[in-house]
Image (tube, rainbow, N blue to C red):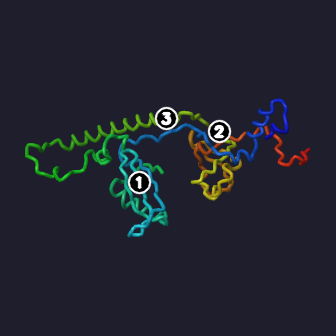
Amino acid sequence: MLCEHFYWLKMRKDVNKVCKQCFKCKEAKSKTQPHGLYTPLDVPNEPWVDISMNFVLGLPKTRRHHDSIFVVVDRFSKMTHFIPCNKTDDATNIANLFFREVVKLHGIPKTLTIHSTTHCSPFEVVYGFNPLTPLDLSPLPPNMFTSDVASSRAEYIKTLHKEIKEMIEKKNQKLVTCKNQGRKELIFKSGDWVWVHLRKEKFPDQRKLKLQQRKDDPFQVLERINNNAYKLDLRGKYNVSSTFNVADLTLFDVGNEIDLRTNPSQEMGE
């Protein structure tokens, strides 16, 4: 459109420069290329010391009036508990469900993180054996009982856990190689200014309409937690956590400011 009415040397270069530094262009432009490298979580050494939790919401009500599912997954064995709950449950109710359905069976985990990998059933990975069938309950001949059952069982579980961890780490390494294709590492320093991508899950009110802005005005980096997480100074603008993944951040170039008058008749400042 511009070429139909104007022309000057290095016109394309100048237009690209203006678009890259235009506030309105930055706010409206969506992200297509993910930032930062994919970094999997550390593999735990044993079952039920590191778990992940999630919720499935908005389901049809059951006879007991439950409309959601509280999902708790052991990151080592992949064993999962599906706990009925309600969308209106508060933190106290969820904590009670967690202790009643998970802690009483497996103990308190060390960390919380909100089957094809292990090549074993989740039950076998956790307990060292698969659940008994009716055939397994048949009486065994006296000569089948040995005195070192407990020690051999403990050794088997220990060996199994070691093998499972190696399998998960090998699988994670393949996933890292696949996920990081086309990605580049992006590191911010304390004091840098960044755009924040308004993700629908975190900013539902700011992304109600299709044509609403995709990024918000630059915020300053307060702290680098790790290469994938940063704490920003939101200046009280949003009632959300101030910690963001690097995938939701874009570096803001504070230098090389240019005059971007929206009105061609607007007078320039002195």
Residue 32: percent from the left, percent from the top? 61, 41
Q: What element carries label 2?
A: loop
Q: What residue type is labelled 3?
A: Cys
Tell me which amino acid carries mark 1: Val
Classify 10 Å Cα crowding around label 3: few (below 14), some (14-19), many (20 and above): few
Image check: 186 left or right of 217? left
- Picture coordinates of residue 231, whole percent (x, y): 61, 47
Q: Residue at x 7, y 46 (%)?
A: 142
Q: In the orientation shown, which residue stands out farthest toward the left?
A: 142
Q: Which of marks 3 and 1 is in front?
A: 3
> What secondary structure is marked by label 1?
strand
- Counting residues from the start of the chain, the first of labels 2 and 3 encountered is 3
- For marks 3 and 1, the one nearer the N-term is 1
For disc 3, the marked residue is 178
Q: Nearer the viewer, residue 64 or 76?
A: 64
Between the residue at mark 1 and the residue at mark 2, the CA separation in whole angstroms equals 35 Å
Choose mark 2 or mark 3, whichever is in front: 3
Q: Is mark 3 on a helix, strand or loop?
A: helix
Q: Is residue 117 left or right of residue 209?
A: left
Q: How crowded is mark 2: few (under 14 residues within 10 Å), some or many (20 or more)?
A: few
Q: Is residue 54 above or below residue 183?
A: below
Q: Distance between the Cα atoms at labels 2 and 3?
A: 27 Å
